[in-house]
Image: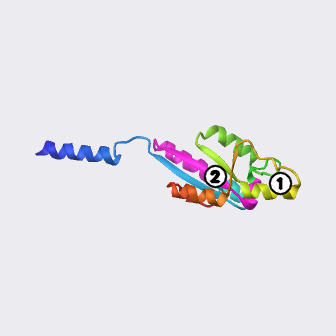
Amino acid sequence: MKSIIAAAALSLAICTGAFAEGNTHYVAIHVNENDPGVMNMALNNAANVNKYYGEQGDNVVIELVAYGPGLNMLIPDKSPVADRISTMSLEIENLSFAACGNTHRKMSKKAGKDVVLMDEASVVPSGVVRLIELQEQGYAYVRP
């Protein structure tokens, strides 16, 4: 009887992932302010989450979504955190930066030319929609 209970417990542990190493966590970080403090806090959040889960033996996928005034974070000559973004992109494999296409179009129109974004940024149609999609995919939502 004990062996049947032990086998059932082992089976349950395997099915629920109790023995699984390296769980993967998903985090969406929202930046919509042109404030160096908010931008640095968002990057601190990403670094701290990555460090914490790495120490636990887990993985984390982090997407930082910038729109509205927060898009300045991803514009090389305007971003107060451009160097930090470049460094973190090299250090944190699963960190990505999404730039709102709506905001980018409006900024480009106002500037009368295409506003260049950092190489690390990928344009998405809408920052708000991207945050919705990520949450629907199970991402935890963080707004510094």
- Residue 121 position, x and y percent, is 70, 46
Q: Specify the quadrant of the image occupied by residue 69.
A: bottom right
Find disc 1 in the rendering and name its residue: 108
User: Where does the magenta region start and end?
Assistant: 45-72
Q: In the image, is residue 27 above or below residue 21? A: below
> Disc 2 marks which residue?
64
> Where in the figure is residue 86, as x and y percent of width and height?
71, 41
Vertical comparison of 86 with 26: above or below = above
Mark 2 residue crowding within 10 angstroms, few (<14) / some (14–19) / many (20+): many
Left-right relation of 63 to 18: right
Q: Nearer the viewer, residue 51 or 92?
A: 92
**Quadrant showing the C terminus:** bottom right
Of badges 1 and 2, the one in the foreground is 1
Is 21 on the left or on the right of 80, as rendered? left
63 horizontally vs 74: left or right: left
Count neighbours of disc 1 (C-alpha within 10 A) and say few if under 14, some if 14 to 19, many if 20 or more: some
Taking the image as shown, residue 46 lies to the left or right of residue 105, namely left
Residue 133 location, x and y as percent?
A: 57, 56
Q: Kindly state the secondary structure of the residue where label 2 is placed.
A: strand
- Percent x, y for residue 74? 74, 50
Number of marks drawn: 2
Amino acid tagged 2: Leu
Q: Are marks 1 and 2 in contact (CB under 8 Å)?
A: no
Q: Secondary structure at mark 1?
A: helix
At 66% from the left and 57% from the top, the residue drawn is 127
Q: Amino acid at mark 1?
A: Ser
Give the quadrant of the N terminus: top left
Q: Is residue 34 visible?
A: no
